[in-house]
Image (cartoon, rainbow, N blue to C red):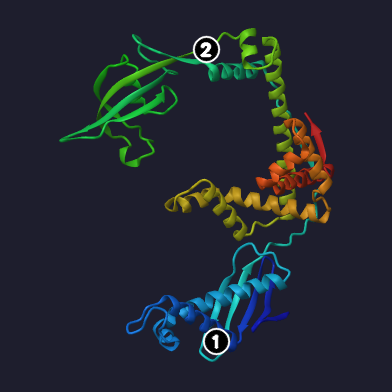
Amino acid sequence: MTTTAVAGIQITRAKEAPGEASFKVEVAPERVERAESKAAQEIAKRTRLPGFRKGKAPVAVVRRKYADAIREQVLREVITESWKATLDQEQIEPIADPHVHDLKFETGNPLTFELHVELKPEIALERVGGFTLARTVRPVADAMVAEQLEELRRQRGAWVPLADERPKPGDMVTVTLTTLTEGETAEPKDYPLVIGQGQAIPDIEEQIMQRLPGETAEADVRFPDDFPDETKRGTTRRIRLALREAKRQQLAELDDGFAREVGDFDSLDALKQAVRDDLEAEARREADADVRRQVMEQIVTANDVPAPRGLADRLISAYAKAYSVPDDKLEGFAAEFRTLAEAQVRRDLVMDHVARTQELRATEAEIDDRVAELAKRRNAKPGEVYSQLQKAGQIKELEQRITEDKVWDYLLSQSTVTES
């Protein structure tokens, strides 16, 4: 048990267990009084009381009138200061803000409370190697190359309007839909969509394919039983549908001219080879990723690596914010994402432990070398690229990638990897 004191605040390490710690805090009455006086003066400056000009009310009157607000400000100040002092003087790695317990705040007595905090756990890895891993590179079939070439054709295909022909799957259309109900007609809405991609319910797509561009018709359509909006599942609605426009994509011939249009390729064969090379490189990356997944799963299982709830919750919150998950969907999102978040937490704990114990952190020289590689690919000067990365706040990310690459290399070197 250790005790520290900072400007009238005494902090005592009360309890420590795997993944958590508690600190007893005692704030001297004099320190509380200074905080109360400061809070009262600040409130007096911005408050107008009957019979007094703004900012001229006696402090004693302000203290009686705004006792609760003063108390709240005092607590906020001393708790924040106590937590900062704890972080400055204790060797801890918190994973979240602390919880306050057992608060006692009585006039004339020390203000006391406990800070309970979740800590980044210290894990012990008894085994990080001796595993057998299978690295399987998926073969690239001719059909896969052909599909990629077709995708290139679709990306560059021109959309040509249809005049006297009904649209079919794959065509792009613009329709105006109006929902018709008894005694009321909804506002018409325009919808662009590609037929056959599930962007409209089947009955509406069927109605579209029965019309010529410019035609309008009314029909009853039924919503599927698995429609996202539960209130519409299995229901039938009367609609008015106007087919405003229909277009069909014209694809270029797959020949040497197309290859030259796509890029710096002399012939179609050269383009095919480039596509195959890209697919094979992707297959190798997928195989590498799978081997890394295998070794991490075996390390986690062999060492029973924990996933502290606080770390998982923080990761879930970060992803929810990144995906702009609305408040009413947070609970469902957290439940669905928790397993993935816990796996990520275990992975991060293992990676950090190995990087630290094996001294595998990225060095300045390695960062400079990686920047030089990026500069060469961009045909730029290393100094310029470094400045760009620094301005974008990406140097830390680059350092993390280098560290992780070194950790993966180390972990795979401790096991047997079979190729297939």
> What residue is pinned by disc 2?
251
Question: In the image, is residue 66 above or below residue 208?
Answer: below
Q: Residue at x 59, y 66 (%)?
A: 97
Q: Nearer the viewer, residue 197 or 267?
A: 267
Q: Position of residue 68 (x, y in %)?
A: 43, 80
Question: In the image, is residue 102 above or below residue 30?
Answer: above
The three-letter code of the residue at mark 2 reads Leu
* Quadrant hosting residue 266: top right
> What residue is pinned by disc 1?
33
Q: Residue at x 51, y 88 (%)?
A: 106
Q: Residues within 10 Å of mark 1 (few under 14, many from 20)?
A: some
Mark number displayed over residue 87: none
Q: Nearer the viewer, residue 386 or 204?
A: 386
Question: In the image, is residue 119 above or below residue 287?
Answer: below
Q: Residues within 10 Å of mark 2 (few under 14, many from 20)?
A: some
Secondary structure of the residue carrying numbered label 1? helix
